[in-house]
Image: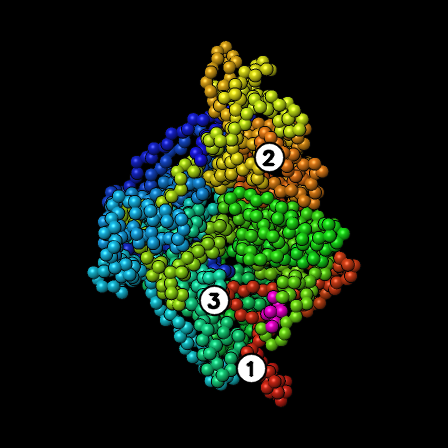
Amino acid sequence: MEETSWNQKPRGPGRGIDTQRPSASEPSNSVVLDRDNSSHSSVPAPDGPSTGVAQQVYASSSAVVSSNDMVPTGSNDLTLPLAQRKAKRQTRLPARYRQDDVLPEPLPPPVLRRKRNDPSPPEGSSTPNTVEPIAPTLRPPRTLVVHSSVQNVFGLSRTYQIPEGFSVTHDPHGAITLKDLTDSSIKAVRTTQKRTHNQAYGPFPNKSAFSLADWYWNSAHKSFIDFQKLILVLKQPDFTLPDVVDIKWKAAFHALGANREDLPDYEAHWIQDDGWKRTRVFIDIPFHNRMRNPGTDRYDAGEFHHRSILSVIKEKILDVEDSRHFHYYPYQSSWKATSTSPEVDVYGELYESKAFRDAHEGIQQLPTNPMNEGLERVVVALMFWSDAMHLTSFGTASLWPCYMFFGNESKNRRCQPSERLGEQVAYFIKLPQSFNDYLKQRNDGKLPTDALTAYSARQLLQAQWGILLDQELRDAMKDGFVLIVLLSCLRNNGGCPCHRCLVDKGDLSNLGGPTDVERRDKQRCPREQALKVKEAREMIVKGYAVDSKKLDVDLKDMSLVPIPNVFDCLSEFNFNISASLVVDLMHEFEIGVWKRLFIHLIRLLDAFTSTTHHNGDTLTAALDSRYRATPIFGRGTIRKFGTNASAMKRKAARDYEDLLQCAIPAFDMLLPEPHNTILKKLLFICAQWHALAKLRLHHQLTVDFLEYTTVQLGAQMRRFDHDTCAMTTTRELQREADARARREGRGKGKGTTSRKPVSFNIFTIKFHYLGDYAASIRKFGTCDSYSTETGELYHRLPKSWFDRTDKREFEAQFTEIERRQARLNKIRAEANLDPTDNRDVRRPGAEPSPDCRYSLGSNRNRVVHLKHLAQNPDLWGTDPYTTEFIPKLKRHLLARILELLGYEYSDIPLDPDAWTNVVLEADDRIYSHKIMRMNYTTYDIRRDKDVIHVDTSQCNVMALNPEYDHSDPDSRDPAGPYLYAKVVGIFHTNAQYLGLLPDGSRSLESHRINFVFAHWYQALGPREEFDLDHLTLLPLNHDNALGFVNPAGFIQAVHIVPQFSLGKKATGIGKSVLIGTGPQDVWEAYYLNRFADRNLFMRYQYGMSIGHNYMHAETFPPPRVFTIPPDFDYCLPAPSLNPGHSEPTFQVDNPFTPDGGTVPDTDLTQSIEDHGMDLEPALPDDDVEFEGSDKGEEDHIMHQMEDSEVAVMDEMYGDSWD
């Protein structure tokens, strides 16, 4: 179906359009970058330190590396690669095309502003992650000067700190176009940069063979689209069948994935990368003195497949296409909405974060030496993701990959798996299944404690990271490379479970409270921790067990394990890994705190279930019914909920996110008061905190808002625990009891499926982590840049390779497949060929241009004959949609035609019956459409679209309220600055006005006019701070219920959910002949779900959205300043009644159950479940069960010993001294 796109200048609902299309911008001439790599055959080593980000918890981390590959201004070498030349800039569209719908645009280039007076490093740049350079002759540090840009149309500007004599010679923003700022679903196919044609096709003798191999290795699962791509390959003019039939494909594919040293020189001449390495990993296993064969034994854990991190960095930077998108110069972004607004800092990309700027400015301040004099020093940020995964839905095959991304690339590209910007640098190995056999054999048939296995697993992981941090990399670090990566060695179930601070386990519930000061005042000391670990290691050498109580005295209080951290090898650079670990929104909140809260809400519904309501259904069944009735929204934004949302079967993090965003309508009034009010406020605060934490663009005001919401979240969670959970007896869900029984059945006893009482255990280390998000955003940028979701999505790539292996030694085969795909991409780019996986096999014209306001079909298949409607007045009484349809339509068309002719309809004195002179083509025909696409600029200055589909739930839209003026109290509408409508019809027609124009002339020109038939919502009064907006559909007999609107007057789609607790209206909407709509139910009221997506959420943060330019006018409310009042109730627990017990307890005055029973006082410490940082967690010390031990013999030995002897043995050897 062909579509017509429209660029329009909306002036509110019902105003005119401008169908003129702007002409394409012409790029300016390129400017040559001043660089000098002549004396370096690879990436030259820098001479300074850097800082960066790292993430662990389910294994994402970041690193910062610096490298010299630039020279001062003055050189002008046209022979430099394209990546080292300044990118072309695109001129902006003329202002007349951007009046209301402001299109995204890149930031302007910086210019020299002033010299920095203080040449010393800026405050905060002297971070723990610094490097003392090793140089023969030191010279004074460079003086930094400020380069700033002017503000763009959104009020954004950027500031650089550049050494004097240098300039910003490489600006990737200069090559950004509107398509680059557009959501991937509507952007055009990405094209590669044109380069000199190269006829080398690697191990393939000709282009035909290469094209066929490229298609084969870049399409994992064969589909019809893959088949179409194969047809495109075969249809290439230079493809010939004889070129491919006689090739030895097996040998060619082997050479394509092999290392250079594994092939003869004549076959390996084309390979430029270092490939993969294989290294045997050995760890030391300590057997304490009470075992049969004490001492330390060296164990061969297996073969470790990995790549050299330094070689990957060089390969990436020297690649022309990749380097073109690299941001070598960090900058500070600021935003000034209006001339009277304060200028605030902006947080988004990693390369504009404080950590990156501090690293960059720090290495500029280091003294120079003859080796690096004249070269610019730049920072390269490395980000690591690592998490084990199953390769199949059934079976035990698993892989533990380590992905490395570059923070110098935009997160909008980096976080898209289709861009394939991640590098696979390692496949971690676990302890083999034969490890237990080894332990038994070494210990005369007895299996030692699980603590020894956990100790060995931790040691194995550290050993593999030690291999990655090889000597080559460390030597480079001495000349400037700085790397910070994964894992601080913490234990499970320790007294201080946080890796950032020394918060006690009993204080994890104090989130946001005045007593939550540990994260600021009690930071971990790396030297103290290293000293404790060293002392514990010495005790292990003396024969103590790894889990002995003597070691616990020194380690458990700080949650340490007796494993030296491999990153201690960076101690000479004064590096601290704990300072670099960042937050993990997906695991800590979405499937952490929120998942735990949702599970307990299901328990509460079971506890409050009553057959006197909900037609005899349980409250859980009512919840499931409401979730099923919740309408979908967007392109996968809110998905259709399954049969039973409460069952939580096979749900991913995105499913729990949807459950949270739609929780308020689903849980409304299921619990009795006052619990319903407490719960609704808690759900609102949780959704608001999640929306703020997940914003892709922050500034000072939104981060302050996040901190304010964090305080509210902590207080409301404690209130909910105290006033609802502690007052209600809850038991395990049946599936929880079944799972517990299965776990118990695998032990020594037989599990029972009876449902046991369970408390609200939300106050874990993950709850404590929520207080670190604001600080992490200020330092490292927005959470989406380093979210573990990036690594989880990247798992799809190695998973797709598994079917290509023999299912046995698949790690080695994965390394070959990875190299094959990478080398094919490189050969294709050097040969200037179109990517196979980017060939658009869809029908052209299916997607509109992103600079259009909206688009709809141009076909005339569905015709509505208005003459038939006029000749059947009986329909007016039975079909309310037809009432006054023709007069209203022609009045709307008259206004649109006059505006197209250049007249302002509101200023023209026309006859009241002038609309009768509006004539439609072909006997008053209009043409109906089902779908309309709307493009809009998002809060983070990107282009996105919504699809409006009539007769479905995705038909609700919002528009600006032309009557709203915040500056005039008398004109403030209770509906606020927006109007909401349900689109019941999308039409177009060709119309002309035959009457006299205001100047006395006539125009017989026919105009195509698109219009929407809308059913308006009405706001139901003002909302409270922590409540959603309430709407209701205007009755069809209301004068203003139905109307015609210019599609350009709509802003975006909205998610409107029924308020299920109020039920449906007695009478719905009948079938309409005019628009083809069948009978519909109408609810008494609706919730406006502002949490459906982040852009919709920011529509209601007045004055805070950078990309929504309209809200910075005086008619909109100013940004709110969020402050906690002095008398705010933090709902902190009462002090413990037991002086020797440090954990707080809540005192419950009148506990009750739904059945009228009582419940004992709830000890908050029972709610604390510790989650350590280990990827291979061990069982808690007091819950370890030992397989292969004789319990009766152990009891007999202890019976014959004195108490003092037992105490000594326990202290030295722990629970395993027998």
What's the amino acid at mark 2?
A: Thr
Q: How many marks?
A: 3
* Residue 351 is a magenta residue: no
Splitting the image into 4 quarters, where does residue 73 fall?
top left
Would residue 513 be found to the left or right of residue 84 on screen? right
Residue 743 among magenta residues = yes
User: Disc 3 marks which amino acid?
Assistant: Thr
Vertical comparison of 619 with 896: above or below: below
Q: Is residue 434 placed above or below 570 in the rendered structure?
A: below
Magenta region:
739-745
Instruction: Measure the C-alpha gap from mark 3 to mark 1.
Output: 28 Å
In this view, the mark in front (3 or 2)? 2
Kindly identify the residue that appears in the image at 37 percent across and 36 percent down: 90
| Residue at numbered disc 3 | 396
Helix, strand, or loop for circle 2? loop
Of the image marks 3 and 1, the number of the one nearer the N terminus: 3
Q: Which residue is mark 2?
A: 1077
x, y percentage for residue 229? 35, 47
